[in-house]
Image: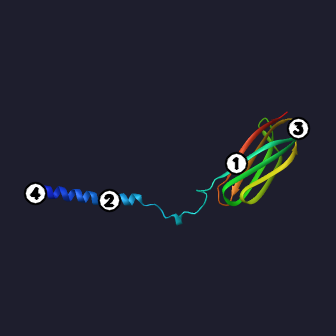
């Protein structure tokens, strides 16, 4: 009976010993020095639109913002939509260093359907895009 108790005590201690080491193995995390602020930690967003300037004149614009300071290029392409055909009406691009970039251009429209597509790329972040559709009457 004494041998049985010693074996039970030994196996319990061995189990606790193994548990202690396996628990610390799972608790290990990478050193924070190995992680740099890159695309996994930054967020790049883009927006675009047409803003009325009065009459048939509109401001076509695109803006981008990032959660980190970087070189950002934002551009837009404005199309007239007739059925399934897209005809380029206007485009613009701008590059800025910091957390935002903006581009705009004044455009005169005739009545119809239009699509503005904005894209942004960052030197740290990945790219982003946005599309909006408008009907001008």
**Mark closest to the chain's N terminus, 1 or 4:** 4
| SS under mark 3 | loop
Q: Residue at x 62, y 56 (%)?
A: 42
Q: Nearer the viewer, residue 1 or 103?
A: 1
Residue bearing mark 2: 20
Residue lying at the far right of the rendered structure: 55
Give how far apart the Cα atoms at labels 3 and 4 are.
Answer: 99 Å
Disc 2 crowd, CA 10 A, few/some/many (<14, 14-19, 20+): few
Q: Which image quarter: residue 94?
A: bottom right
Give how far apart the Cα atoms at labels 3 and 2 are.
Answer: 74 Å
Q: Nearer the viewer, mark 2 or mark 1?
A: 2
**Mark closest to the chain's N terminus, 3 or 2:** 2
Q: In the figure, is residue 85 to the left or right of 129?
A: right
Q: Nearer the viewer, residue 87 or 123?
A: 123
Q: Nearer the viewer, mark 1 or mark 4?
A: 4
Give how far apart the Cα atoms at labels 2 and 1 are.
Answer: 49 Å
Give residue 2's mark: 4
Residue bearing mark 1: 129
**Mark closest to the chain's N terminus, 3 or 4:** 4
Residue 76 to residue 33: above or below: above
Q: Residue at x 89, y 40 (%)?
A: 54
Residue bearing mark 3: 110
Residue 64 to residue 34: above or below: above
* Residue 102 point in image, percent of width and height: 77, 53
Q: Nearer the viewer, residue 5 or 130?
A: 5
The quarter of the picture where the C terminus appears is top right
Disc 3 crowd, CA 10 A, few/some/many (<14, 14-19, 20+): few
**Mark closest to the chain's N terminus, 1 or 3:** 3
* Residue 97 point in image, percent of width and height: 73, 61
């Amino acid at each position: 009976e004494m041998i049985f108790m010693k074996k039970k005590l030994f196996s319990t201690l061995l189990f606790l010993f193994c548990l202690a080491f396996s628990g610390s193995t799972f608790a290990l995390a990478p050193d924070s020095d190995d992680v740099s602020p890159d695309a996994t930690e930054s967020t790049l967003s883009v927006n675009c639109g047409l803003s009325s300037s009065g009459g048939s004149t509109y401001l076509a614009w695109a803006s981008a913002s990032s959660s980190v300071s970087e070189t950002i290029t934002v551009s837009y392409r404005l199309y007239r939509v007739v059925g399934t055909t897209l005809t380029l009406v206007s485009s613009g691009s701008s590059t800025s260093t910091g957390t935002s970039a903006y581009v705009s251009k004044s455009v005169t429209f005739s009545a119809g359907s239009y699509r503005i597509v904005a894209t942004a790329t960052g030197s740290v972040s990945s790219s982003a895009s946005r599309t909006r559709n408008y009907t001008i009457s």
